Image: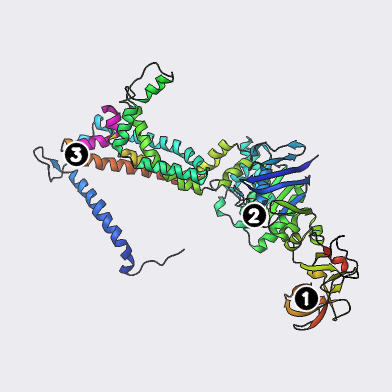
Amino acid sequence: MRREPPRALADYAPLFFPALMLIVFFVVPFSIMIAVSFFKRNPAGFYTPDFVFDNYARFLTTFFGSVLGFSLLLAILVAVCCVVIAFPFTYLLTKRSRAVQTVWLVGLLSVLSLSEVIIGFAWSTLFSRTAGITNLFVAIGLMKEPVALLPSFWAVLTGMVYQALPYTILVLYPALVRLDPTLLEAARTLGASPVRAFFNVVTPALRNTIVATLIMVFVFALGSYLLPQILGRPSNWTLSVLITDQAIYQSNMPFAAAMAVFLVLISLALVGLTLLAGRKESAL
Amino acid sequence: MPGLSINSITKRFGDFAAVDDISLSVPDGKFVCLLGPSGCGKTTLLRMIAGLEEPTGGAIVLDGDDITRVPTHKRNLGMVFQSLALFPHLTVGENIAYALRIRGASKEEQRKRVDELLAMIHLPDFANRPVAKLSGGQRQRVAIARALALSPKLFLLDEPLSALDAKLREAMQVELRQLQQRLGITTIVVTHDQREAMTMADLVVVMGKGKILQAASPIEIYRKPADAFVADFIGITNLLPAETDKAGRTTVLGAAVPGVALPSGSAKATISIRPEDIHFSKPGAGAIPGTVSFVRDLGGTVETFVEAGGTTIVAVATPRERPNVSVGQAIGVVLPPESCVVLQP
Ligand SMILES: Nc1ncnc2c1ncn2[C@@H]1O[C@H](COP(=O)(O)OP(=O)(O)O)[C@@H](O)[C@H]1O
Ligand SMILES: [Mg+2]
């Protein structure tokens, strides 16, 4: 359907409200943050307006560099794990009856209602030595004695994947439901086993959806700052943890703002690169 | 025995039998059309032959081997889906080569076979086009070529032409039939269009409510329909009540049709007579008395509608033998006995 291009100013009227919201709740705070990132810290109070690069300069140390690297890697790993688990799961889910699908989706939605804190403490209990799942393994004879599985990198990863998985499934679900089931059947009549057909046909047909989902989970995981603290060692802390720490506990707003701006820029760059790579591939 | 044989195959979805105890034997190299109204189980039957649906009971035997439990990808068949199901992320050439790629054919082999198939479907030099850029008819051909890439034993098509416009559809019907005869491949096509079935098939299988109503050659189905449903479904027909009068003669709407015998023991039956078999005469003289209610002159054919004994009788003639009648005229309708088919009740 083609629409008339807007002519009079009044034709833009429906855009006023969303534009206002965007400006008030996104553009203004973000601009303030960028401005603050160039301010000078005032140890006695808050900060004083200025234009210095100290906050960014402080950033260029191996310590912050490695934290940034770790944060990005962790977010990428969470995104990949989530998609690898959620994609086949969601695909199989769409093959079930309506009733079964509804039950699963409602269950997943209820996981979404859990806050990061609850998820964090639930997993910290599950991974503890005294009350954790290793007791179960001992009971069924898989292990000699219970051990503590946290704090550790794997505990952080598990918690974050658990938190992001429902989002991943709910994002993938509409695309997989709409996928023409005869594509897979066609591949089977052409001699492909069901598993092979899945990788040959379903995965590439949904490549754009998969890339979009990876980016979404990546960004989502980048913002996680409670789970790394509850489930991980200090070496597993992400940049978001440091930002929170600087902003709230050290009262160093300018530095926190600088880190946040930097994180946003790096994420945008990564997302842009991913999209660019996808564009190039599909142009072939 | 070479060919496909379907032995009392049944498919139930819950309590509902979509395919109900169907047996059918398709000789090697024949072209079969499964014909019937929507929802009668044609697709389900085809999908069971393809192995995409598991039969509730019965067996499918191909060239003497029971393939009922053989998974689809080991059946060596080609199938064209109603949606065509072309792989959107692959080019025309890659789509056609997919089956060869699965078999591990070399790049060179794949390219050669793709060129062969593209020539066969009259789309040379299309190998590198994305499938999204094709027209409806071209997509159709690509789907056919892809299904035939490995020269399968069995070629299955589910309403392959239903998405095309009328003109293109008729052309494709002829082309598909010619292709099948050239390759000599056993082919089963699902359709709900009787013209399509008549154009292409060696054997037309008319289905209704999960059962086979009649399986015969197109001309036999047309000339000797087994029951009122088949007669009505295949082409246009007049279904008229026939009865035996006191003198023992068979009469239709009050006029005697000598030489037409009703099944023994029944005094009433329905006969089917095709519009092109009906003649007109002066009223009386053993003809059914009627009044012309409408004349439709289509140029190529002339259809005359006659009200007689509470029903409408349709007669078709070519302009050359055009009946000289006008609306409101009283005429006699003559049913040649050799064209009357007494239907099973
Ligand atoms: N997977 C299914 N589950 C339940 N009912 C089905 C399923 N597939 C087909 N049916 C039913 O079986 C009947 C025959 O369907 P189908 O073979 O597609 O008919 P046709 O192809 O002749 O139009 C229809 O009434 C349809 O609703
Ligand atoms: Mg169908």
Q: Is mark 2 within 8 Å of ligand 1?
A: yes
Of marks 3 and 2, the one in the foreground: 2
Query: Image point 28% across, 54% down: which residue?
Result: A22
Dot 3: few (<14), some (14–19), or many (≥20) neighbours within 10 Å?
some
Q: Which mark is residue A202?
A: none
- Indicate left or right for A154 with A39 as reference: right
Q: Is residue B198 left or right of residue A151?
A: right
Is any atom of residue A5 visible in this view?
A: yes
Disc ID at residue A247: 3
Crowding at mark 2 (Cα within 10 Å: few <14, some 14-19, many 20+): few
- Between disc 2 and disc 1, the foreground one is 1
Q: What's the distance in space between the residues labelled 1 and 3, CA to CA?
A: 96 Å
Q: Is residue B21 magenta?
A: no
- Dot 2 corresponds to which residue? B39
* Separation of residues labelled 3 and 2 (CA atoms): 66 Å
Q: Main secondary structure of the magenta part?
A: helix
Task: From the image, tell me which residue sits under label 1.
Answer: B309
CB of residue at label 1: within 8 Å of ligand 1?
no
Dot 3: element: helix
Q: Earlier in the sequence, mark 2 or mark 1?
A: 2
Q: Badge 3 sits on which subunit? A: A
Residues in magenta, as a range:
A227-246
Q: Percent from the top left, x then y, of residue A118? A: 30, 36
> Is any part of residue B115 visible from this angle?
no
Q: Is residue A235 left or right of residue B296?
A: left
